[in-house]
Image: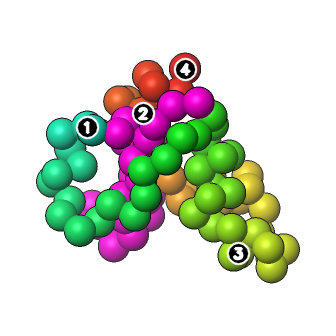
Amino acid sequence: MTTLSIIGPNLNDQSKATFHVHAAGCSDIGKYPNKLITTGEYASLADIVRDVYSDILDEGESNIDDLKSEFHVLPCALRALQ
Ligand SMILES: [Zn+2]
């Protein structure tokens, strides 16, 4: 488990994904004021998807693999997840 911060949606740059995943405390998070939606302990991208999209997953209309593309994992977070 590692502590990650998720920012989004409606970021200035959405070319990569709706949400960006950073290591907690990453200085880039400050570039997106008021966009931090959560900081928590996660073991994988699937964990993050389950947390952010719990409502949609409960409705059963999408699955975790479909929703992974909504998240861009920055290098700081990739290092933390490994
Ligand atoms: Zn970062």
Are the residues tagged 1 and 2 within 8 Å (C-beta)?
yes
- The residue wearing badge 2 is 77
Near mark 3 (Cα within 10 A), the count class, few <14, some 14-19 or many ≥20, is some
* 78 is within the stretch colored magenta: no
User: Does the numbered disc 1 mark a residue whose Cβ is under 8 Å from ligand 1?
Assistant: yes
- The residue wearing badge 4 is 82
Near mark 2 (Cα within 10 A), the count class, few <14, some 14-19 or many ≥20, is many
Q: Is residue 60 above or below residue 70?
A: below
Question: Mark 2 or mark 1, which is nearer the start of the sequence?
Answer: 1
C-alpha gap between disc 3 and disc 2: 24 Å
Amino acid type of the residue that numbered disc 1 sits on in the rendered structure: Cys
Task: Name the quarter where the C terminus is drawn.
Answer: top right
User: What residue appears at the point 51 percent right and 31 percent down from the top-left corner?
Assistant: 2
* 19 is within the stretch colored magenta: yes
- Location of residue 28 in the rendering, given as x and y in whole percent from the top left corner: 20, 44
- The residue wearing badge 3 is 56
The local secondary structure at tag 1 comes to loop
Question: Mark 4 or mark 3, which is nearer the start of the sequence?
Answer: 3
The local secondary structure at tag 3 comes to helix
Q: Is residue 48 above or below residue 26?
A: below
- Location of residue 26 in the rendering, given as x and y in whole percent from the top left corner: 26, 37
User: What residue appears at the point 68 percent right and 68 percent down from the top-left corner?
Assistant: 54
* Residue 8 in view here: yes
- Location of residue 78 in the rendering, given as x and y in whole percent from the top left corner: 46, 29
- For residue 26, which numbered disc appears in the image? 1
